[in-house]
């Protein structure tokens, strides 16, 4: 009896504050919208994913993961739009790093590849080569990773670059060179 009284009181307080608890149907709808948003994101429909995440939040505002994903994508979309217009190299790199993190976290490897290629084109250093090669290896493009890494002069090949080169060569069954 004590538990049902407490649950009733919590419901009453939530209703008084304008926060109705999500019904089972709302929870189910929210989950479906969130899944749809994830699928749209994987198909690179960022605006569609944002709308689906917003619908998930509306159906179940109590789910923190829905709110976080919606808020994050709301920041990512304008960042994507501004990136090409960014003239200052350090600001471009900062924005690209944030986008890359989002892409990697969400398994958007082809978006990551495009971003890494542009970063390497702009900066051409060991760090950008390493990130680009890492993405190329993850996508099974080992020959491209070998090309990316061997294009760096020997004096700019960091230990990390050498390890990645060995991995790319090994994936391409070039074991003697990998060693």
Image (cartoon, grey):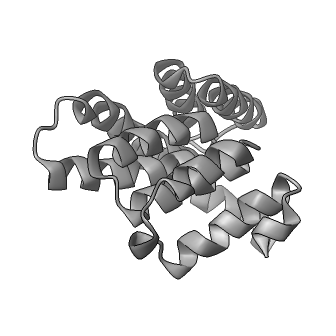
Residue 116 is situated, as x and y percent measured from the top left of the image, at 45, 45
The image quadrant that residue 178 belongs to is bottom right
Q: Is residue 148 left or right of residue 179?
A: left
Front residue of 111 and 50:
111
Camera sees residue 140: yes
Residue 110 sits above or below residue 61 on the image: above
Residue 99 as seen in the image, left or right of residue 31 = left
- Left or right of 42? Residue 58 is left
Picture mark count: 0
Q: Is residue 65 visible?
A: no
- Quarter of the rendering occupied by the C terminus: bottom right
Vertically, is 168 above or below 117? below
For the point 72% across and 32% down, which residue is it?
A: 35
In this orientation, which residue lies closer to the viewer: 118 or 149? 149
The residue furthest bottom is 159
Residue name at image x 61 percent, y 57 percent: 134
Q: Residue at x 28, y 44 (%)?
A: 122
Tell me residue 67's x, y (percent).
49, 46
Front residue (pair 91, 79): 91
Which residue is rendered at x = 42% and y = 46% of the image?
72
Q: Position of residue 174 (x, y in %)?
A: 84, 58
Residue 128 lies, in percent from the top left, at 41, 57
Looking at the rendered image, the quarter that the N terminus falls into is bottom right
As displayed, is residue 90 above or below residue 46? below
Looking at the image, which is closer to me, 68 or 57? 68
């Amino acid at each position: 009896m004590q538990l049902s009284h407490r649950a009733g009181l919590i419901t009453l307080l939530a209703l008084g504050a304008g926060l109705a608890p999500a019904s089972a149907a709302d929870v189910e709808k929210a989950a479906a919208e969130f899944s749809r948003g994830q699928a749209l994101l994987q198909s690179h429909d960022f605006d569609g994913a944002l709308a689906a995440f917003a619908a998930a939040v509306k159906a179940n505002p109590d789910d923190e993961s829905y709110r976080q994903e919606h808020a994050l994508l709301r920041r990512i979309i304008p960042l994507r739009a501004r990136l090409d217009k960014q003239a200052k190299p350090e600001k471009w790199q900062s924005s690209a790093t944030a986008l890359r993190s989002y892409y990697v976290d969400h398994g958007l490897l082809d978006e990551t590849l495009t971003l890494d290629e542009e970063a390497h084109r702009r900066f051409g250093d060991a760090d950008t080569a390493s990130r680009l090669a890492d993405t190329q290896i993850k996508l099974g493009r080992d020959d491209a990773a070998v090309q990316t890494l061997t294009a760096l002069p020997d004096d700019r090949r960091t230990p990390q670059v050498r390890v990645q080169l060995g991995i790319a060569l090994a994936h391409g069954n070039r074991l003697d060179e990998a060693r």
